[in-house]
Amino acid sequence: MHTASKIARITALAVGIAGALAWGQADAAAFQLKENSAKGLGRAFAGSTSAWGDASVVATNPASMRLLDGRQFQADISAISFSAKLEDGYSAKYASGAPIGGGNGGDAGMIAGVPASYFHLPFGENDNMHFGMSLTAPFGFKTEYDRTWAGRYHGVKTDLKAVDLGAAFSYDVNPYVSFGIGVFAEHLTIELSNAIDFGTIAYSATKGASAALGLYPGSADGFATIEGQNNAWGYVLGATFSVTEDTNIALSYRSKVEHEINDGKATFDVPGNVATVLQTQARGLFVNTGGKATVTLPASAILSVTHRVNDRWTVMGDVSRTAWASSFDKVVVDFASNQPDNVLVFGYEDTTFASIGAEYKLSDTITLRGGMAYDQTPTSDEHRDVRVPDVSRTWLSFGLGWTPSEKTEFNFGYTHLFTNQPSIHVATATANVLSGEYDVNGDVLGASINYKF
């Protein structure tokens, strides 16, 4: 079993199952999604939980349901355009120093829709209690490179989605103080694929003897696909204070969510000559198998302030903090086969999102919005990966609201993300190295309808 252990050890990172169960990205830092409201998007989510008239607070701060006007239903859709291209001048090399061919992989980004919907019902004496339901996507991302690109050993496809179905309740102590709580069920799905350099694995395991059989670094690529899903629960706590009739201060906390993935599936495509030389089936290595791991989606807290200056102008601001460090320090994966446990250290750091924005009521039916934000990345040059070429970004947002009747409101928002060029320097356990810089861009367009009944 010594040879089998050696093979397993030098290929633990190449398999990449922990990456499958952890990586992803969106238009907030890492793979966190803020795009749950077109109205909020138009002001860079300043006042996200303290502004009047946005039903997305059902999911983000139930205490602020007091700021909604009666029974209503709101539906939002955001189109996220994310581009990530490895720039020319990158370096991709095998351990021998020979170049890895295949190109830069093309644009790994995507255009995807992120839906959300909300329901609000006030009840009780003087409508001092509130019930709400929500359907949101708080985390998600997808990147996909050409299957034969130069960084194929580090990642080809990453697809992560988290969908929440929530229920919320709040109580108004008086017209100035409210408390709320929400619970949600979260469904998480993950898929990841990457190439495996079996030529290097065979060459190393046989101390070069496999070269006589045509097996040497880069000569025999295989492929691995990892999939997993899980359902888990979380909660949201909130408090909203109206220090004057024109000023709201809101505090909210979203819990972390631990997903125990016990039925993960790993599928391996192993070249026939490699399987014969390494006896993978007999040793239980690189065989189709199950796996399990714990994936923790991070907790976050928001401080939100909104102030109505006069009948036309309203200003707002947000500061939020996401606890990535305690959730994404490392992930341990236990294979059901003879493959040893895989431990990947991510080294994510806690992040801050800060925004300011304003609304101007142009007329009784038209409202204009704008905002700016700074969104900090949890990644660093040391830990950045091709699956998540993330970088801190600045938001510039604009929005428009149209209220054609007392019962119906339409909102539109647009955000452009300004970024620097994140660099990467990554190596597999077989010492295949990729270095370079990315060109990363992002735009978000959102629309919503709110109907009161």
Image (cartoon, rainbow, N blue to C red):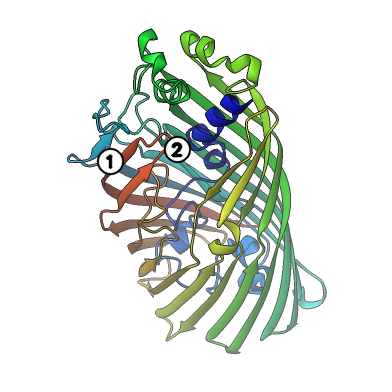
Q: Where is residue 141 in the image (x, y as percent from the top left)?
A: 48, 44
Q: In this view, does 279 lie to the left or right of 105?
A: right
The residue where tag 1 is placed is 85
Q: Quadrant of the N terminus?
A: top right
Helix or strand or loop: what does disc 2 sit on? Answer: loop
Helix or strand or loop: what does disc 1 sit on? Answer: strand
Q: Is residue 396 in view?
A: no
Q: Is residue 159 in view?
A: yes
Q: Which image quadrant for residue 52?
A: bottom right
Identified at 27% across, 47% down, the residue is 438
The residue where tag 2 is placed is 429
Q: Residue furthest bottom?
A: 244
Q: Which of 258 and 71 is in front in this view?
A: 258
Q: Which amino acid does label 2 sit on?
A: Ala
Q: Is 318 situated above or below 154?
A: below
Identified at 39% across, 59% down, the residue is 380
Q: Residues at badges 2 and 1 in contact (C-beta under 8 Å)? A: no
Q: In this view, does 347 lie to the left or right of 170?
A: left
* Mark 2 neighbour density, 10 Å: few (under 14) some (14–19) many (20 or more): some
Q: In which quarter of the image is the C terminus?
A: bottom right
Q: What residue type is labelled 1?
A: Lys
Q: Where is residue 2 in the image (x, y as percent from the top left)?
A: 60, 28
Q: Which image quadrant for residue 53?
A: bottom right
Q: Earlier in the sequence, mark 2 or mark 1?
A: 1
